[in-house]
Amino acid sequence: MSSHRACNNPLYCRNLTGHLPASYKWPLKCRYDGMFQLNLRMMAPPRCAVASIKALRSIAIAAQLERGFIASRIYQDVEDPEALYLQEDWCSEKELKSNIRSSCFTDLLMLMETSPEPPVLEVRSVSEIHGLEYIEAVRFET
């Protein structure tokens, strides 16, 4: 199994769904209550990669209809094209749990079963999100 690497570095990963615009503002409720993020890393053999990406896109599109959905991203690792990543952002734990109980999530679980290596699924609770203003404050603090 290849080592797990955060797939946020554009030198290593290819975004297959597009980026959020830099001006995107998190929903007000999320900024006060935090946000929940679902992260999946799974492998897809080269002959199945296109079908797996299409399935992930279909799952991500269906999730957009759920209450509390913020955004999703699908990535493919450039150095290891068999590694696929799905990341979904949810406004609250309650809404993420509702999604986990949905038939859409059942489809994701079935897709994970096709991975030749054990997939890695994580749920993260994000309490704060900072941008360049944080970097500026750290670099120029006295």
Image: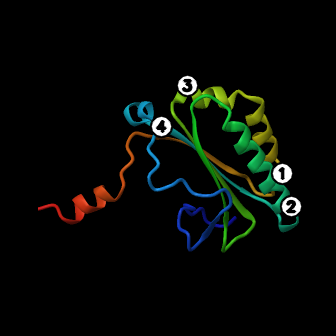
| Residue 15 screen position, x and y as percent | 63, 62
Which residue type carries mark 4?
A: Met
C-alpha span from label 3 to label 1: 28 Å
| Quarter that holds the N terminus | bottom right
Q: Which residue is mark 2?
A: 48
C-alpha span from label 4 to label 1: 29 Å
| Residue 62 screen position, x and y as percent | 73, 38
Q: Which mark is residue 94?
A: 3
C-alpha span from label 2 to label 1: 9 Å
Dot 2 falls on a residue whose secondary structure is: helix
Dot 1 falls on a residue whose secondary structure is: loop
Classify 10 Å Cα crowding around label 2: few (below 14), some (14-19), many (20 and above). Answer: few
C-alpha span from label 2 to label 4: 32 Å
The mark nearer the N terminus, 4 or 3, is 4
Dot 3 falls on a residue whose secondary structure is: helix
Which residue type carries mark 2?
A: Cys
Query: Do residues under tags 2 and 1 come within 8 Å of each other at their CB atoms?
Result: yes
Which residue type carries mark 1?
A: Thr
Q: Which residue is mark 4?
A: 35
Q: Which residue is mark 1?
A: 114
Task: Judge whether 104 appears above or below 20 on screen.
Answer: above
The mark nearer the N terminus, 2 or 3, is 2
The mark nearer the N terminus, 2 or 1, is 2
